[in-house]
Amino acid sequence: MNNGLQFGCDYYPEHWPEERWETDCRLMSEAGFEVVRILEFAWARLEPADGEYDFSWVERFFALCEQYNLNIALGTPSATPPKWLVDQDPSILPLDETGRVRGFGSRHHRCHSNVAYRERAARIAGEMAKRFGKHERLVAWQTDNEFGCHNSTLSFTQAAHDGFRKWLAAKYETVQALNEAWGTVFWSQEYRSFDEIPLPMYTVAQDPGAGSRDSFHGQGHNPGLVLDFQRYSTQAIIDFHQAQVDAIREHCDRPITHNLMGDFPDVDYHRLAEYIDFVSWDNYPAYVWGRTPPHSLGFRHSLMYGLKEKPFWVMEQQSGPCGWRMLGDTPAPGELRLWSLQAIAHGAESIVYFRWRACRTGMEQYWYGILDHDGKPRRRYDEVSKTVSDAKAIEEVFTSTEPAADVALVHDYEHLWSHRFQPHNVNFNYQHLLHEYYTAFAAQGANVRVTSFDRALQSARVVVLPAYSLVDSDTGPRVKQFLEGGGTVVLTYRSGIRNRDNTMLEETIPGPFAEIVGAEVAEFDSHNFGRTTPVEGPFGAAHAAVWADVLEPSAASTLAWYSGGPFAGSPAVTLNAVGSGYCYYVGCDLPDHALSSVAEHVIEAADVTRAPVKAQDGIEVVRRAGSGGEFYVLLNHTGRERLVELTRPMMNVETRQKLGSAKLGPYEVAVIRNG
Amino acid sequence: MNNGLQFGCDYYPEHWPEERWETDCRLMSEAGFEVVRILEFAWARLEPADGEYDFSWVERFFALCEQYNLNIALGTPSATPPKWLVDQDPSILPLDETGRVRGFGSRHHRCHSNVAYRERAARIAGEMAKRFGKHERLVAWQTDNEFGCHNSTLSFTQAAHDGFRKWLAAKYETVQALNEAWGTVFWSQEYRSFDEIPLPMYTVAQDPGAGSRDSFHGQGHNPGLVLDFQRYSTQAIIDFHQAQVDAIREHCDRPITHNLMGDFPDVDYHRLAEYIDFVSWDNYPAYVWGRTPPHSLGFRHSLMYGLKEKPFWVMEQQSGPCGWRMLGDTPAPGELRLWSLQAIAHGAESIVYFRWRACRTGMEQYWYGILDHDGKPRRRYDEVSKTVSDAKAIEEVFTSTEPAADVALVHDYEHLWSHRFQPHNVNFNYQHLLHEYYTAFAAQGANVRVTSFDRALQSARVVVLPAYSLVDSDTGPRVKQFLEGGGTVVLTYRSGIRNRDNTMLEETIPGPFAEIVGAEVAEFDSHNFGRTTPVEGPFGAAHAAVWADVLEPSAASTLAWYSGGPFAGSPAVTLNAVGSGYCYYVGCDLPDHALSSVAEHVIEAADVTRAPVKAQDGIEVVRRAGSGGEFYVLLNHTGRERLVELTRPMMNVETRQKLGSAKLGPYEVAVIRNG
Amino acid sequence: MNNGLQFGCDYYPEHWPEERWETDCRLMSEAGFEVVRILEFAWARLEPADGEYDFSWVERFFALCEQYNLNIALGTPSATPPKWLVDQDPSILPLDETGRVRGFGSRHHRCHSNVAYRERAARIAGEMAKRFGKHERLVAWQTDNEFGCHNSTLSFTQAAHDGFRKWLAAKYETVQALNEAWGTVFWSQEYRSFDEIPLPMYTVAQDPGAGSRDSFHGQGHNPGLVLDFQRYSTQAIIDFHQAQVDAIREHCDRPITHNLMGDFPDVDYHRLAEYIDFVSWDNYPAYVWGRTPPHSLGFRHSLMYGLKEKPFWVMEQQSGPCGWRMLGDTPAPGELRLWSLQAIAHGAESIVYFRWRACRTGMEQYWYGILDHDGKPRRRYDEVSKTVSDAKAIEEVFTSTEPAADVALVHDYEHLWSHRFQPHNVNFNYQHLLHEYYTAFAAQGANVRVTSFDRALQSARVVVLPAYSLVDSDTGPRVKQFLEGGGTVVLTYRSGIRNRDNTMLEETIPGPFAEIVGAEVAEFDSHNFGRTTPVEGPFGAAHAAVWADVLEPSAASTLAWYSGGPFAGSPAVTLNAVGSGYCYYVGCDLPDHALSSVAEHVIEAADVTRAPVKAQDGIEVVRRAGSGGEFYVLLNHTGRERLVELTRPMMNVETRQKLGSAKLGPYEVAVIRNG
């Protein structure tokens, strides 16, 4: 349940002549906007020289906002240290994994581990808080900008090296404990003191099969070291962030957030979320680098909601074509409205459009906003204005309910990192796997909450644990207890193989899950070079193309089996009753139709609430429930009219019309309830 | 009009035993050669140690040339500083954008900005001029070699940094003016002095969509900075070149050139051309890296002619298979002759074949010449000899005419750089676009002159301005005046969007052209991931696959329109009458047949002279006109016999036969005139 | 003839709790194992701090081996210098071609040229020998690990620079001789002293057509320098190895080997083999990076046998799925046995499986062995055990014969390097070419010995010299003499073009072979961008897709000719009688069927012994002959049953059954003899 919807935009007053400000504020106000985010990246204007502050222009902008009833979210400018500061202390700059300086000229040109820089960043944040912290128009803070963007999570400076060693010493206490945990005996990597620990930089060994940039980091290094360096790097970001929070808190009590990036993989958002007051994120469905499929957008919203299980802000909502050097598709008429309502359906309470107007200079000249460079309101301005009034008209649907958590899908950053560093198979991708399971359940009309292991076990009756590889000592018992209490669990291949040190378990796979699965993995078969294995089951015929576990059941029954290949006859998917619950084990990858069929089996057995809509490509349904009742938001993500058959009679919330089916125009959205 | 044709070759006497020289000179003479280029890269033999010169062997070679009636073009050796010089001053070496040394071992291992090296290079050029500057066999100089080759235009040394800052200070006078021009307020990049300006080196931000090597430079940097660094880098090359010119001019008044590289994009040839006495260039149609299509070869020749609108030399004309590590196709029998006559048709007055004989050692072992390593005259020698006599037989065709400029196609290096840094769409390429327009007009039988904006407005009645993005304050008025005087102008999408600082205009697109186009661009739609938009027009049906401007005409009439997609119904191509002229605006990319149809529309409306030949794949026609009358050179670029229907009766210049059609054998060339 | 078969495994006692050791030794013994390789990579446990040795645990392991009748092969740990040693002297670390440190964290992090490190590595080897050199269980030594692995052959440190210059000074005596040999006059690269010679590091010139990592080295550099640097780098490895051999020999006389890597291209194994007592190599047929086709595995075994023409060890035989970050295919049931018997058929006397058990930590967590992480014997353990007993049952087949050398295929590392640096054509690959010729002859039932030029001329009647490019002064005469003695020689395009300085010959191609070939190459035509040339011959119709030599025969007769393209009519394949021998010249690449047809022509003319089996995809035949008679090993490399027709009656050695055909189950192997 949110406290009411609000809309706004990201604005950079410093980019425009002061004479223009009022026109902009007026147009914002006329569009129904209530909030403006400013000052992100404005360091050089706020502190043009060391210790010389100029906030006067900001005060004039605050005054205008007062006049036009606009609230303000303040961004701290620490993602763009000015040149004078970098020249003063070049050690601020991050180094890449081969030791090269990542220099001044764009943004994020600072190593989060640099303690002196942390203090400088906190100082400017503190000065801003001192000046504006009590201003009644100030409603929120955003620290920095998109932590980790441009591959900036990891840095290989001396500061990072020092920080990492210190962090390791605190974690392991003795270097013997570290050697034991990482298994450094392999390849004679035993360390005699924490001072000997290296950073995972460029090594002799490079996997010729790697290729992608993400996978370069730590190539050849000990998996324990690599995982700990990822953990440390999240901590360095948290410390960097927290220094600003502390400085702000000396003068201000307004909520503080950071703008996250959906399913960005490099930072542990579950951990970072503990240090922010509410979640916000930046949502760009139509990048030049790719169009996000509808269910993946849903996945991202659900993940963002799941971080705190509370309404979130979209701090940057795409409002025009965008790109740096090349431009992505222009949002088609209707898409801006669709994206906004999708976000709200999934739990957003604020939609802040990025950006108000395309900047004439700098690297983001092609990152268009609501207005083009010419500053004239046109089609996109009109569409956004209409979106605001349309959403406000049905606001109570959202203030009285929240997105349902019918199925919980577990997302874990340490698993992600471990899987990314060693993805088992060239076509295995943990994030894709999560999206596949999300889509399979969503296609069956179940509302999926993406969340952490801990929250999942608390909040849902069906918990899906794809490739849940890293286990703690209590992981097995907790899942067993959940099952015995009547829960349903879905595990897959590559679960229960490692401990949290990233060390392979000595138990037979799936390790602590073997008993509840009721089967062991006698062998597995990674599929390379286009080889596939036929699988048969309730879904008919399918093929595994990535992985096939060869299962030896002790208690489980067989749902699907390999019907060919070297391990023909082995079970592929099993089901085991544990107490009053059910444990599924999916031992291979499956194509969409087969996975969807497995999801249906799970949903029916667990009696999960399903939407009144049959699965259709391009049509999304979001279920919301709460004190206000139960609503379904139907979203047509396609550019053509669609007729959606309903499985039971419903009513359109806006028109109060009874419906046996819903006709949705291109990119149209309808909110329905039981009728 | 040229002063008569001459032929020759590039020779490296230092590569061969002195006993062989006379055989070579005799064979050259027997082939009809009149000129030999020597000494390029010979520094280590001319100055084997600091200040110790040895020109005696060169004098002996001059004597032989005297004997065999060969003239000499002297190359200065500055592209290959010897090891003793590099060891003396390693700061000569260029650095790449990540700061790595680009070391000794190949060529071009010097930063053009290095002032000390400029002096060293000028010193050896001066010594050469002192010794040979008055020799009667000396007919021309070539400075250095292919400036910018191997991605060497940009260098990131301290010398370049110093030079760039100085150049900026001279250009902008105050750093405030620079901050304003570049819009450095974006991302807090404001500078307080010129000493704070960085080079566009490796930054945190890298566009994952980039990929290609060319586009890496300046990734993430301010577009104004990047464009100015390209400008500066051309200036550094000019200064480097001019230092040698000055040194030579103290002792010699023979013409000085530099060997350019066709449509090589990194150096502003329009500016460099001001510092050379005549244009020369290196023409390799069949590289290992790709075969150049016939019209692209024509484009290059036309661009080279257009630099000074005067006859040029081909300083290196491919004469065998070539490559460094891998070999390209061997020129088929007839191709050497074809390429030579094509060059002459387009305005070459000298054809210098590269190289006389394949070198036995070094990185160019596989860069074959007229002779193979064994030094025996064979098929290619015979073909070249025949080419010389054939061309000489019809020499007056070329001395009495020049290539016609029926249509002027504007080529601008600053546009090229701006488009390359931010190409709008992953499939947009300014150079390809120019080639497409060249080909479309050439296919309609119009002779296209590729030239600068200034020359185009002076010399042609039809001016084509593809993606003419960067505008000066007088650009709009000058084009309008040209139109009002009866000219025809073709503009395309991505025109009139920026000023010369690479800053986006505040005017609605197409900015200063909006009035003459008679329409505004309300929106645009970059096409990604294979999406296309159907277009209909006089050409029938076509698809835009890269870009679609959504046009709102004020005065223009619609020639073609979008017949589907999100912006169906919008005009795609418009035509506007301005005074007695016509202004076309092509708002989207078009496939060949549609673009050719647009070109036909333009040509017919403007009553442009057309060749008597219908467009055919692989057949090129070049129109020459002048005091000697009007000639058409027909070139068969294919390996099979072709029958070319003529639209009016013509006469073969060599055979004096009347023709209704021309039969051309594989790679054959015919010169015809009205008969 | 080998001295009896033995089996074993690679074991790392330091990876496991000491309590587990006895279980492991017992299981090995029960599997029939007789040998265990240990201590490779164990430096940190053997010398935990400078000069402090701990061998006590090794002694305890030796004692257990005594108990379980296991012999020991000792690996020296020099491929993994511990961190304390690297910190003591960071100059140990290798540098890449752009000067970046290839740091600590994986293995092979040492420059072989570093003299101080050579001594440190020899010291630990000597200490090991002092302690265990006389132990009766010790049967062999292995120095280091897979020299050159992870692209570590070349290093660009100061030590390498010093070593290279010294090596050059010893080779050329005067720098004038070096300048002459390399032809440094090209591009002014003449050196005045050995101190001026550079390493082939990053240069300005990079061939945009290159791309692959292997080909980057020396890009732009003089071909003579590049070839000499490869030669030097092999010598540096030999010196590094020999320092350990010398240290061991002070205390021990047991045989010393090094584990090679099949057709790994970077180290000259013919030279290295002179410094080891027997050959051993690491055989992984099913990598994650690719599956090796059956004949390529045969090629590798044959090459390893040919290094010394003596039985070899497989020091690491794949025994499970493996990979670093991704896993390759799991060996299907039957494949482990097949690979083992294939190795034995081709001359292996010891099969040592890698590894006993998958390691729980470190970069090779996914490099599975006979046992999984759980340590439980399962299918693969059973298959290996059966393989041991099956092989032992027919041991005399292998102790009384050796692999036949019916055809000798010449493999030369200097040719390989020269071809790799300048591969003539983008699709030319010397190694692939050798595999093609191996396969063509093997498919015709001829047993092919892969070996050096010298051994080939001594041991076989048919010698195949694919792309034999580099010639010495006596190469031509020696081949001629071989032919005159009744030998058959097959030469191909790109033969006889260079001398050993990597300089192009001044003679017309094929240089010293022209007389015996009875033809000259008037032109050649490298094929790019998918162009092909039709060829006709006894094989019917085919196409050359890489290269076509245009031949002018003086004495040769034409076997095949170009039937189209610019050089139609020219011979493509010729045959010339020389004395009582025949010289074939194959002037173009040919597809499999055509090459196989040429091989058949050769075999029939030379009356080579052929196997009683017709060529079939996936079926391999190995002929062994010797005092014990003549045997054929039939191997089914496919996962399905195959019926192999025999061309003459044979007998199954195991079953003593007479056979007209052989039925082979999936991956099954049969040994047959004339029946």
Image (tube, coloured by chain):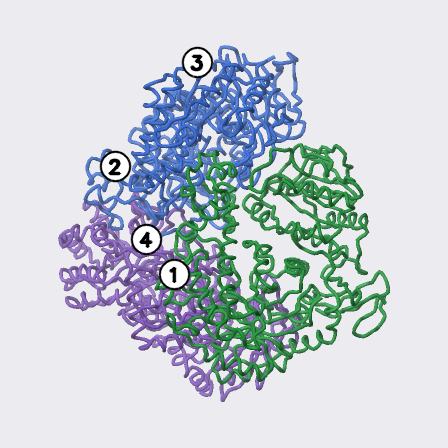
Chain colours: A purple, B blue, C green
The reply to whether dot 3 and dot 2 touch (C-beta < 8 Å) is no
Describe residue B173's horizontal placement relative to residue B14 as left or right. left
Q: What residue did someone put label 2 on?
A: B168
* Pick the front one: A93 or C282: C282
Q: How far apart are marks 1 and 4 (CA)?
A: 14 Å
Label 3 or label 2, whichever comes before in sequence order: 3
Label 1 sits on residue: A201
> Mark 1 is on which residue type?
Met
- Residue located at (56% from left, 36% from top): B366
Residue A10 location (% of width, % of height)? 28, 55
Q: In this view, does A251 lie above or below B89?
A: below
Task: Judge if badges 3 and 2 mark residues of a common chain.
Answer: yes
Camera-near label (3 vs 2) is 3
Marking on residue A101: 4
Q: Say which of A664 and B167 sits in front.
A: B167
Question: Do discs 4 and 2 share a chain?
Answer: no
Q: Distance between the residues labelled 3 and 2?
A: 44 Å
Spatial separation of the CA atoms under disc 4 and disc 2: 24 Å
Residue A71 seen anywhere in this rendered image of the structure:
no
Q: Which amino acid does label 3 sit on?
A: Glu
Output the chain of dot 4. A
Estimate how packed mark 1 is, as few (under 14), some (14 to 19) or many (20 or more) residues with alpha carbons within 10 Å.
many
Secondary structure under badge 4?
Answer: loop
The label on residue B136 is 3
